[in-house]
Image (cartoon, rainbow, N blue to C red):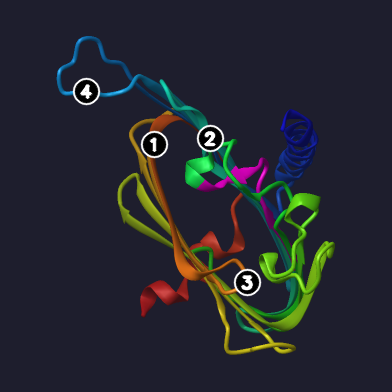
């Protein structure tokens, strides 16, 4: 996993350094809004009649939004990385969080707040996952780029302000990669034949991000997406929703609650749910002023 994390970390460092230099420009075309977190948890027991097992866990994450806005052009890049583990006495080490989510979207405005856009995204995980609570002795069900989802498409983006972005792509190619040979079985993630490493789909993709400031230092970020495959069973929608509730305690300490809900017929014909809670260290980056942050571009607040 270190071999995977190293090039990604270098890429982020180079990209952030480049953007920080650009932010110094008086035009403020580039902006960076990011949070880096390290959450820790631990429990210890000694002669405790109520029972319990000693355990220690950690969860690290990076969430970057790097945006270019100038004239009629909009280029938004999102980087979400997360990985966590928990070690419980008598059980061993299990992963508790594992996510790679990278996306980019470039558009040119053709009407107020509407952009003709093209974009791409990648979703996967860093390490192998297993049945029975990620027990490495159980059946393996996932790995790096198994599955890995790549979307490339054309459409329109509606972005009235920095708190809401919606992208509709009536022409979107969705490729599901299964690069682990142990998982290349017919039916696994929709594969048509044993030994296949990729499933191609073409259809409609809709995504949205909505940010809400509930109160001072408490923010909620909602994300949602829907995909319909024109080529095969368009009624089998792939639905995803995610929520991140961030409660900032002070400059360096915050608490995060995340909820993810997913339904994908090609994965499992059941609704999937994941929830995490953590308290720990956070380092925020907030550089550059987005065009949509300026008061004269926030007409939606006057309604």
Residue 254, how many percent across, how many down?
39, 35
Tell me if I can see residue 43 in this picture: yes
Q: Residues within 10 Å of mark 2 (few under 14, many from 20)?
A: some
Question: Looking at the image, is mark 4 or mark 1 nearer the viewer?
Answer: 4
In percent of width and height, residue 41 lies at 38, 26
Residue 3 on the magenta span: no
- Residue name at image x 75 percent, y 70 percent: 191
Does 263 sit above or below residue 249?
below
Residue at the spot x=76%, y=39% of the render?
A: 8
Which element is circle 2 on?
strand
Q: Is residue 110 left or right of residue 219?
A: right
Which disc, if any, is residue 51?
Answer: 4
Task: Using the numbered discs, state the Cα–Cα distance from disc 2 to disc 1 in whole angstroms.
Answer: 11 Å
Instruction: Specify the label residue 278 is tagged with.
Output: 1
Q: Is residue 185 placed above or below 111 in the rendered structure? A: above
Q: CA distance from mark 3 to mark 2?
A: 26 Å
What's the distance in space between the residues labelled 3 and 1, CA to CA? 31 Å
Residue 249 x, y percent position in the rendering: 33, 34
Which is more N-terminal, label 2 or label 3?
Answer: 2
Q: Secondary structure at mark 3?
A: loop
Decide which of tag 3 and tag 1 comes sooner along the chain. 3
**Label 4 or label 2, whichever comes before in sequence order:** 4
Of marks 3 and 1, the one in the foreground: 3
Q: How many marks?
A: 4
State which quarter of the image contains the N terminus: top right
Percent of width and height locating residue 22: 76, 44
Q: Is residue 2 left or right of residue 285?
A: right
Location of mark 2 (residue): 84
Mark 2–mark 1 contact, CB under 8 Å?
yes
Stretch of the chain drawn in magenta: 120-131
């Amino acid at each position: 996993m270190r071999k995977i994390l190293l090039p990604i970390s270098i890429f982020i460092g180079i990209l952030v350094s480049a953007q920080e230099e650009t932010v110094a420009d008086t035009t403020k075309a580039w902006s960076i809004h990011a949070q880096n977190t390290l959450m820790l948890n631990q429990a210890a027991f000694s002669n405790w009649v109520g029972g319990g097992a000693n355990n220690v866990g950690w969860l690290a994450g990076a969430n970057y939004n790097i945006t270019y806005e100038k004239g009629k052009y909009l280029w938004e890049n999102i980087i979400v990385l997360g990985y966590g583990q928990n070690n419980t006495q008598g059980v061993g080490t299990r992963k508790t969080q594992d996510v790679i989510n990278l996306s980019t979207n470039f558009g040119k405005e053709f009407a107020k707040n509407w952009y003709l856009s093209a974009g791409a995204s990648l979703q996967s995980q860093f390490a192998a996952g297993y049945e029975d609570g990620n027990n490495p002795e159980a059946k393996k069900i996932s790995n790096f780029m198994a599955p890995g989802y790549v979307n490339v498409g054309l459409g329109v983006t509606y972005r009235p302000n920095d708190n809401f972005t919606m992208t509709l792509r009536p022409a979107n190619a969705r490729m599901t990669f299964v690069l682990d040979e142990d998982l290349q079985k017919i039916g696994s993630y929709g594969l048509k034949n044993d030994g296949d490493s990729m499933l191609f789909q073409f259809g409609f993709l809709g995504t949205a991000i909505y940010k809400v400031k509930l109160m001072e230092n408490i923010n909620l970020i909602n994300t949602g997406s829907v995909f319909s495959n024109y080529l095969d069973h368009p009624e089998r929608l792939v639905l995803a929703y995610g929520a991140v509730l961030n409660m900032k305690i002070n400059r360096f300490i915050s608490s995060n609650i995340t909820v993810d809900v997913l339904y994908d017929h090609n994965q499992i014909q059941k609704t999937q749910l994941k929830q995490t809670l953590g308290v720990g260290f956070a380092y925020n980056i907030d550089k550059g002023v987005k065009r949509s942050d300026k008061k004269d571009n926030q007409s939606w607040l006057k309604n």
